[in-house]
């Protein structure tokens, strides 16, 4: 499990003019993120607009990345869907393709499910995947999903799937919650969902972060992960400043401007590109943060 640690970017999904996943642009972005300090990349998370794509589109994009030579051993894939059969199909596909792990959202449409119901859904998923080499992390993001994973639920799942259920991404933003995951679950890899909580997570026994803003801050997050504590304050301030805007559209807007490629701004409905008001606010934020860490080289 030593490879499942460090700074991971929850990557955006570049789109073509007809709003289809652009494998060429994504492969280029993944390579760039590796050069900017990322230990790995997560595809089809929240930032990757996962739930705006069909199962077949998600499968095909992964296959195209493989064809383009992307190292899938440094890729995790979000595979959690509302329907268990979809989660099973995507998880099997990612495992068989050689991805290093999968990230499982809870089934997110029904909001008042019991612990028994949630345990049954994840258990059914992992049992039906039927792969001994499955390496799954849970994805805890109750603000978006409407439900999340509690410590008792995780204990029950680990009892049955300990060799396949390795950890969790905690995007709750709650330090107490992060502490509970780190301290109360043995042999469990805990990733913070924000680099702003990376120093805290490491102190509590976590292994790194999986972050949307790592698309533009990974160089700084990697420096902090590697022990340059003096950089932590700037990293935290930059993340918190960017939180004032819609993450997906903001990351795509920033990357499009940096790479001088307007097509990178495209998002799938129901998301929209940044409004003029949002762009004005972004300019104010960049005035306060200075050049974003991953863009410094362009300034030299």
Image (cartoon, rainbow, N blue to C red):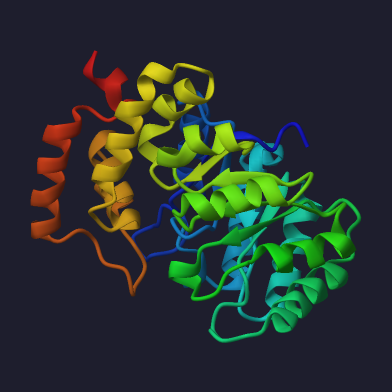
Q: Nearer the viewer, residue 183 or 246?
A: 183
Please provide percent x and percent y for residue 218: 43, 32
Q: Residue at x 42, y 48 (%)?
A: 212
Q: Is residue 110 left or right of residue 212?
A: right
Please provide percent x and percent y for residue 204: 59, 37
Q: Residue at x 51, y 63 (%)?
A: 141
Please provide percent x and percent y for residue 257: 23, 40
- Marks counted in the figure total 0
Quarter the C terminus occupies? top left
Quarter the N terminus occupies? top right
Q: Nearer the viewer, residue 125 or 48?
A: 125
Is residue 279 depicted above or below 28 in this figure? below
Please provide percent x and percent y for residue 283: 11, 42
Is residue 91 depicted above or below 220 in this figure? below
Q: Is residue 116 left or right of residue 213?
A: right
Q: Nearer the viewer, residue 23 or 10?
A: 10
Is residue 295 depicted above or below 29 in this figure? above
């Amino acid at each position: 499990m030593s490879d499942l640690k460090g700074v991971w970017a929850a990557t955006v999904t570049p789109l073509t003019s007809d709003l289809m996943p652009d494998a060429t642009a994504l492969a280029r972005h993944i390579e760039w993120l590796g050069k900017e300090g990322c230990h790995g990349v997560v595809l089809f998370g929240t930032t990757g607009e996962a739930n705006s794509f069909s199962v077949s589109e998600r499968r095909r994009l992964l296959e195209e990345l493989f064809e383009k030579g992307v190292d899938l051993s440094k890729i995790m894939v979000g595979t959690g869907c509302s329907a268990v059969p979809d989660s099973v199909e995507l998880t099997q596909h990612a495992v068989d393709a050689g991805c290093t792990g999968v990230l499982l959202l809870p089934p997110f449409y029904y909001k008042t499910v019991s612990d028994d119901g949630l345990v049954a859904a994840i258990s059914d998923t992992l049992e039906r995947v039927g792969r001994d080499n499955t390496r799954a992390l849970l994805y805890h993001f109750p603000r978006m999903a409407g439900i999340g994973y509690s410590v008792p639920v995780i204990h029950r799942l680990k009892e049955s799937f300990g060799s396949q259920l390795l950890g969790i991404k905690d995007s709750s933003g709650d330090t107490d919650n992060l502490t509970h995951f780190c301290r109360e679950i043995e042999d469990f890899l805990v990733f913070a969902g924000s680099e702003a909580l990376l120093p805290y997570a490491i102190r509590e026994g976590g292994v790194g972060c999986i972050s949307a803003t790592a698309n533009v801050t990974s160089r700084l997050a990697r420096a902090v992960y590697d022990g340059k504590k003096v950089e932590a304050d700037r990293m935290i301030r930059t993340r918190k400043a960017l939180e004032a805007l819609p993450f997906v559209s903001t990351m795509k807007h920033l990357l499009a401007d940096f790479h001088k490629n307007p097509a990178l701004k495209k998002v799938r409905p129901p998301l929209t590109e940044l409004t003029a008001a949002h762009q004005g606010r972004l300019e104010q934020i960049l005035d306060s943060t200075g050049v974003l860490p991953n863009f410094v080289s362009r300034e030299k």
